[in-house]
Amino acid sequence: MRHMFFRRASRWAAALFVLLATNGAIAADGASPYRIVGYATGWDPAQTKDVGKIDTLIYAFAQLKDGRVGLDADRSKTLQTLLALKSVNPKLKVTVSVGGWSAGGFSEAASSEAGRQLFADTAAQMLSAQHADGLDVDWEYPGHHESGIRSSADDKANFTLLLKAIRASLDRAGQKDGKHYTLSVAIADGPFVSDVDIPAINPLLDWFNLMTYDFVNANTPTTGHHTGLHASPLIKGDGRTTDRAVQQFLAAGVPPKKLVIGAALYGREFADVQDDHDGLYQPYGHFVNMLTWPDLKAHYIGKQGYVRHWDDVAKAPWLWNAKTHHFITYDDPQSIAAKMAYIKAQHLGGIMYWEQTNDPADELLDAMWHGLNE
C-alpha cells in the first residue's frame, strides 16, 4: 500500500509538472520563463526575505554628465547594497539604469560618433568596475522635450547608433570579464516612440521595459486609468493602454518574450474632478500628488470617503471621493493579477515595476510572483 501510494504520488507529480510546463508556469529546469524586474532607488532590509522572487533589480539611476556615464560615491554605495543581495539569491541580476524623466544630455551625447563611443565605453567601464550585470537606458524620450531636456530631429537615427555602440562596448567588456552584459531600455508607447526605430533597436536589446503607466498625469486633460490594461469604454479617441503598447511593439516585429510590461506601485491623485462616472475620464482642476501603495492602503482605500471602484473592461481600480471630488488611479493586487494573466495569454517576457521601496511589505510583488508562477 505504501509503495502504491508513492507510485501514484509520482504519477501525480509528473502530471502536474507537465501541466505547469504546458501552461508556461515553469521551464524544464524548474525556473519560471517570466521575468520579474524591479526598478530600485534603494533597499529596505526587511524586503530581503522576498528577494528570491525577483529576477532583475535595476538600480536607478546612474548619471550622464559631460557625456560620461557614472556613479557618484552615494550612488555607488546604494548599488553595492543591491549587489550584496546576490548572496541571498545567486541567480539575481543587478543592472544599472542611466537617465530618468528629467535627465538630459542624451541627445547631445548621441549626436556624434565620439560622443556615442564615450557614453558606451564609460557605461561598460562602470558596470565592470561595479561588478553589475547590465545597462538599462532610460532616455525619456528621443525626439521629445516634454521633460525639459534637449531633443533633435536626428535623435531617431542617433538613438539606434548609440545603442549599437553600447552593445559593442558591453560585448567587449563581457569577453574580458567572462559574462554577458544585458542591455535593456525603459521605453514608452504611442506618440512617445515616434522617434524610435523599434525594428532597428530590437536586435540590440535583451528586452524592452515598457513603461505602461503614467497614461494619465498632470499634462493630460482628463483623469483615467494611469496603468490600465485595456481601453475603458469611457476613453475618448485612441487612448493609451498596456494592451495598445504591447500590440504596437509586436507590430514592429519585437518578439513577445522581449516585452516586459510595467506595473505601478503608486497612484495618482486629481482634484476638482467632474463627478460624471464617479470621476473616471473626467476633466479636473489640478493634479495633486503621487501616492505610494502603503499610503493608499493606510489613508485612502475605503477611508475618508474614498470608495473603490473596478473597471472590468480596463481591469483597473480607481478611488472616488464624492464629497471632495478627488479621484485616484492606481494598481492593486486585482489589477496586477489581471496583468499576469495577460502576460501568460500573450506569451510575454514578464513584468517590471516602479519602484521597489513603494511596496515595503511586498504585497504587490507577491501578486506578481503568484500570478506568474501558480
Image (cartoon, helix red, strand yellow):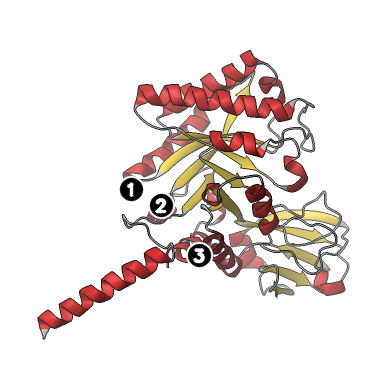
Contact check, label 1 and label 3, Cβ < 8 Å: no
Mark 3 lies on a secondary structure that is: helix
- Looking at the picture, tell me which residue is in the foreground, 168 or 184: 168
Answer with mark 1 or mark 2, whichever residue precedes in sequence. 2
Q: At 33% from the left edge and 57% from the top edge, which residue is drawn?
A: 28
The residue singled out by tag 2 in the image is 51
Amino acid at pointer 2: Val
Q: Position of residue 39 (x, y in %)?
A: 54, 45
The residue singled out by tag 1 in the image is 88
Instruction: Rate crowding at label 2 as few (under 14), some (14 to 19) or many (20 or more) other CA atoms within 10 Å.
Output: some
Answer with mark 1 or mark 3, whichever residue precedes in sequence. 1
Q: Quadrant of the C terminus?
A: bottom left
Q: At 50% from the left edge and 49% from the top edge, which residue is drawn?
A: 37
Q: Position of residue 145 (x, y in %)?
A: 79, 34
The residue singled out by tag 3 in the image is 367
Answer with mark 3 or mark 2, whichever residue precedes in sequence. 2
Q: Residue furthest bottom?
A: 1
Judge depth for marks 3 and 2 and give the one in front. 3
Judge whether 93 appears above or below 19 on screen. Answer: above
Q: Position of residue 329 (x, y in %)?
A: 71, 62
- The CA span between labels 1 and 2 is 7 Å
Instruction: Rate crowding at label 3 as few (under 14), some (14 to 19) or many (20 or more) other CA atoms within 10 Å.
Output: some
- The CA span between labels 1 and 3 is 21 Å
- Would residue 35 be found to the left or right of residue 333 on screen? left
Which quarter of the picture shows residue 112?
A: top right
- The CA span between labels 3 and 2 is 14 Å
Mark 1 lies on a secondary structure that is: loop
Contact check, label 1 and label 2, Cβ < 8 Å: yes
Judge whether 174 appears above or below 206 on screen. Answer: above
